[in-house]
Image (cartoon, helix red, strand yellow):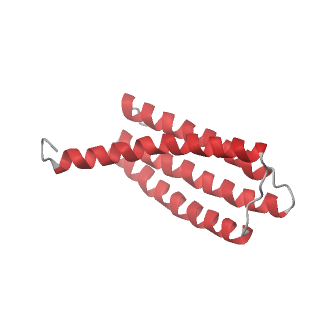
Amino acid sequence: MATNSIALLADLIHNGGDALIFVSACVAGIEAVRRLVNPEAPDHLVALAVAGMVGFTGNWLASIVRLRAGRTLRSPVLIADGNHARADAYVSLAVVASAVVVALGASIADPLIGLAITVVILRITLQSWATVRHGQVH
């Protein structure tokens, strides 16, 4: 507010969004543990699977574009963003797996997959941070 800078505001919002990735992983982990302690199967499994497939497709395409551009431009930030999108695609695929396994009768799989997703989110967040911090291009 003191600087009246839109650039600073945009950077603040972006950094806040990045921090929310970590917070969302923590919330997901806590909820997964809660569901393990107090089991409750998800509903609307077809909608769950369709949502997972839509997420997978969108994130996979985004990862291809970002990784290709990042390698071409030798941009660690774009590469980190592409890796993030690819991890998001795998997470969405895990959502599809959760719907399938729950439909087969193993409702415990949903919170277990939720815990696995939490680990993936935390891992890609740390990798992205390291890539940008060290400027490594893979």
Q: 8 left or right of 75?
A: left
Residue at the outermost left position: 3
The part of the image, by quadrant, that contains residue 43 is bottom right
Q: Quadrant of the N terminus?
A: top left
Between 118 and 35, the one lying in front of the other is 35
Q: Is residue 78 visible?
A: no
| Farthest-out residue, front | 38
Image-based side of 15 in relation to 127, left or right = left
Give the residue drawn at x 65%, y 69%.
50
| Count of residue discs | 0
Q: Can you name the residue that lies furthest to the right here? A: 105
- Left or right side of 20 for 109: right
Counting from the top left corner in percent of width and height, residue 47 is at 67, 71
Residue in view at x 80 percent, y 59 percent? 102
Q: Foreground: 28 or 121?
A: 28
- Hey, which quadrant is residue 71 in on the image? top left
Question: In the image, residue 81 lies at what x, y percent?
Answer: 43, 47
Residue 128 position in % (x across, y down): 45, 38
Residue at the (50%, 40%) spot, across then down: 22
**Residue 65 location in percent, x, y?**
43, 57
